Amino acid sequence: MTSPTVALTERFQQALGKAFGDEYADADPVIRPSSFADLQANAAMALAKRLGSKPRDVAAQIVASLEVDDIVETPEVTGPGFVNLRVRAAWVASQVESLGNRLGVPEQPRQVIPIDYSAPNVAKEMHVGHLRTTVVGDALARTLEHLGHEVVRQNHVGDWGTPFGMLIEHLLDVGEDSPEAHALEARPNDFYQAAREKFDSDEAFATRARQRVVTLQAGDPDTLRLWAELIDLSKAYFNRIYRLLDVTLTDADLAGESIYNDALAGICDELEAAGIATMSEGALCVFLDGYSGREGKPVPLIIRKSDGGYGYATTDLATIKHRVQDLGADRALYVVGAPQAMHFKMVWETARKAGWLDDSVEVTHVQIGNVLGPDGKILRTRSGDPIRLMSLLEEAVERAESVIAESRPDLDAETRSGIAWQVGIGAVKYADLSVSHDSEYTFDFERMLSLQGNTGPYLQYAAARIRSILRKATEAGHAPGPVVLGEEAERALGLTLLDFGDVVAAVGDTLEPHRLCGYLFELAQAFTSFYESCPVLKTDDADVRASRLALCSRTLEVLETGLGLLGIQTPTQM
């Protein structure tokens, strides 16, 4: 299967070489969707100056050299030099029939791609700020794997640092198997806040907590055992969230700060020995050209603090070194909040200076924007605290169940509950993924759960409706057959189906899942137009019915596959 854009690009380049010489055979024909035709080639506009001719004359020469009768109807030169192209229905039908199991999605040359995403903190609840990194990162992981890459999920959890002194002491105070300890599995903030309150109000406890940090960092076996217990309790909480959110992260993907502890001293020694890091006011720092703060003062990347401790910069340097040298990364993605942009730039520039990162590795900060409330500010509770992710997701499912209970009172409780989870979680994930990952968006349950417009439930309903059509067809003894596109709505749906592979490849290249969301919405709209104007089961012509059932079947496959790449399930009924 070949998309029209790919097929025509090849033919246009052949025509460019034939019309103007071999040096023009690799020029971009600039083929884009058009409101005046299916596609428009704008190469003449770009080449006119180079050729010393008027764009319209260049377009006419291109058309005269084109051999595309099997793909498009007669090309039309319009305006100052545009070439309008309308794809033949027969060609579209043949390509829809040859979509294959991969539905046109290419298998790209394999790359090793570590993806850093989610990254919650041990003994703390995940809040709405963790939603986007988790959802976007998981969609990218699924998509890149589908394109043939080896994705290495890296859940860089916060599992080390000074707070663990007070957390371990509080664990000892309440008892390792106490209800308070097991609160870490469901409401970890309760445990953390109790420890913090004691640390702030009880000097004896604070002294013990500080000493416990020392024994932890020194590798005391019993302290490490207690620390590991805190990790295990928190993992149970993380996994509850991940199961509810239906993401692919597992315990095997945990790559917390602690795994780099043994490398941090060596990172500092190597940078200092190379003259990349220097001492400044008792701290070991890297000063890079082009990074300055207020009054033009240079901004340091502090890799060892004046008290001898290490910070995020040191750990992140160890991280990129590990991902390049040990994991063999070809690309490395960091799906992290936009405010960390300068930090990562400084870390990666330092890594390049040290020789740990070179131009053969593409490292990208997939910047994550904020989730806003109706007031246009970062989404928080009325008291100003970050909203618990668990409560947000549970509310989404509850709201979805209320909608389904009203629209489908015939469903039993178990079926309704299962659909509610798929719809509620799908609605939240789609609302997040359907906007550019680096932009902000307003969280609105009513809008995201709507069956109208560009929403997850709208696409899920489209898939469920197609499944119902195919089920009725099977019951009546009808089956899909050869595709024949006699109506314009059929041709339009077929054309849209052919874009799927290019869109998925573009998501892998640009790391922008919202492109796939936009495509799936366009496909669902094309199907709605087709269904409204082209009877499927009610037509008397058996060949037409078989063709339309084939279109239904392919549309369902693309919807299910596309939503699956976004991490969204499709209910069998709604």
Image (spheres, helix red, strand yellow):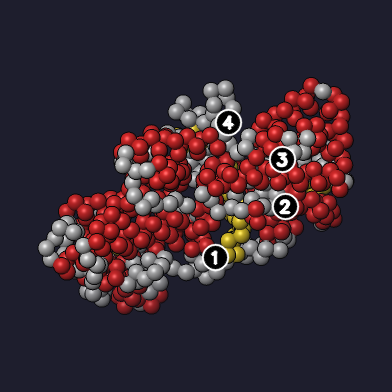
Q: CA distance from mark 3 to mark 1?
A: 37 Å
Q: Position of residue 440 (x, y in %)?
A: 48, 38
Where on the picture, by quarter, is residue 34? Answer: bottom left
Q: Tell me whether circle 2 and circle 4 mark residues in contact (CB < 8 Å).
A: no
Mark 3 element type = strand
Q: Are marks 2 and 3 in contact (CB under 8 Å)?
A: no
Residue 167 image point, x, y percent: 76, 35
> Label 4 to label 1, Cα distance in Å?
36 Å
Question: Cβ–Cβ below 8 Å for labels 1 and 2?
Answer: no
Q: Earlier in the sequence, mark 2 or mark 4?
A: 2
Q: Nearer the viewer, residue 505 or 545?
A: 545
As drawn, is 196 to the left or to the right of 471?
right
Classify mark 4: helix, strand or loop.
loop
Q: Assess disc 2: are there few (<14), some (14-19) or many (≥20) residues with their C-alpha within 10 Å of its C-alpha.
A: many
Which residue is disc 2 drawn over?
Answer: 317
Q: Which residue is mark 3?
A: 299
Crowd around label 3: few <14 · some 14–19 · many ≥20 (10 Å):
some
Could you tell me if residue 337 is visible in this image?
yes
Q: Nearer the viewer, mark 3 or mark 4?
A: 4
Report whether residue 42 is seen.
no
> Which residue lies under the disc numbered 1?
149
Q: Closer to the observer: label 1 or label 2?
A: 1
Q: Amino acid at mark 4?
A: Pro
The mark lying in front, picked from 2 and 4, is: 4
- Give whichever of discs 1 and 2 has the lower sequence position: 1
